[in-house]
Image (cartoon, rainbow, N blue to C red):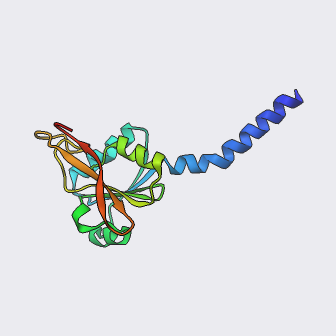
Amino acid sequence: MKRWLSRAGISLLFALLFAPAALAANAFDVYRDPSCGCCGAWVEYLRAHGYTVSVHQDQPMAALKARFGVPDRAMSCHTAVIDGYVIEGHVPVDDIRRLLAERPDAIGLAAPGMPMGSPGMEMGAPERYDVVLIGRDGSTRVYATHGPGA
C-alpha cells in the first residue's frame, strides 16, 4: 500500500509540475478586428482542434503586429501567440503543431494575405499558398505549401 501511495504521490507531483507547460502549449491569444468574420472562423477552427483560445479585439492591429515583429510582407488579418511564437493569419493547425514540435529559433509562422481555402477562408475556389517561417531578423522562408498542386 505504501508503494502505491508513493507512486501516486510522485505521479501527482509530476502532473502539477508539468501541467502549466502543457496548458501553455495548448493556449492561444488571438488579436483580431471585431468586424472580421474570417478571423472568427479561424478561432473556431482552432477550438475544433482542441485549443483554448482567448480573443482580444481592442488592440490597434498595426502597432500590435509591429510589436510582435511581423514584417509587412507576412501580414494578414489577425495575429495570434502560442507558447512564445507568433502565428499570423490563417495558418493550418498541422503547421502550428510542427512548429511547436521543432521549436526553431524564429518569431513564428505566417500565411500572408488571406488565401482562399486556408482555415477560416473556405469560401471560393481554394488557391495554392505558402506558410512562411518568420526569422528573428524579419526574413521569411517557405515552411509549408498548401492548396491545389501542393
Q: Nearer the viewer, residue 124 or 144?
A: 144
Q: Residue at x 54, y 47 (%)?
A: 23
Quadrant location of the N terminus in the rendered image? top right
Name the outermost residue toward the top.
1
Q: Where residue 112 sits: x, y (%)?
A: 23, 56
> Would you say 14 lies left or right of 116 here?
right
Q: Where residue 7 sits: x, y (%)?
A: 79, 34
Image position of 112 with respect to 23: above or below: below
Q: Nearer the viewer, residue 142 or 45?
A: 142
Q: Nearer the viewer, residue 46 or 35?
A: 46
Q: Where residue 123 sits: x, y (%)?
A: 14, 41
Q: Where residue 41 sits: x, y (%)?
A: 27, 45
Image position of 65 with respect to 131: above or below: below
Name the outermost residue toward the right.
2
Q: Residue at x 36, y 69 (%)?
A: 137
Residue 34 found in image quarter? bottom left
Q: Residue at x 23, y 44 (%)?
A: 118
> Would you say 9 lies left or right of 27 here?
right
Quadrant location of the C terminus in the rendered image? top left
Q: Residue at x 50, y 49 (%)?
A: 25
- Report if residue 25 is visible in the image: yes
Image position of 17 with respect to 62: above or below: above
> Would you say 9 lies left or right of 135 here?
right
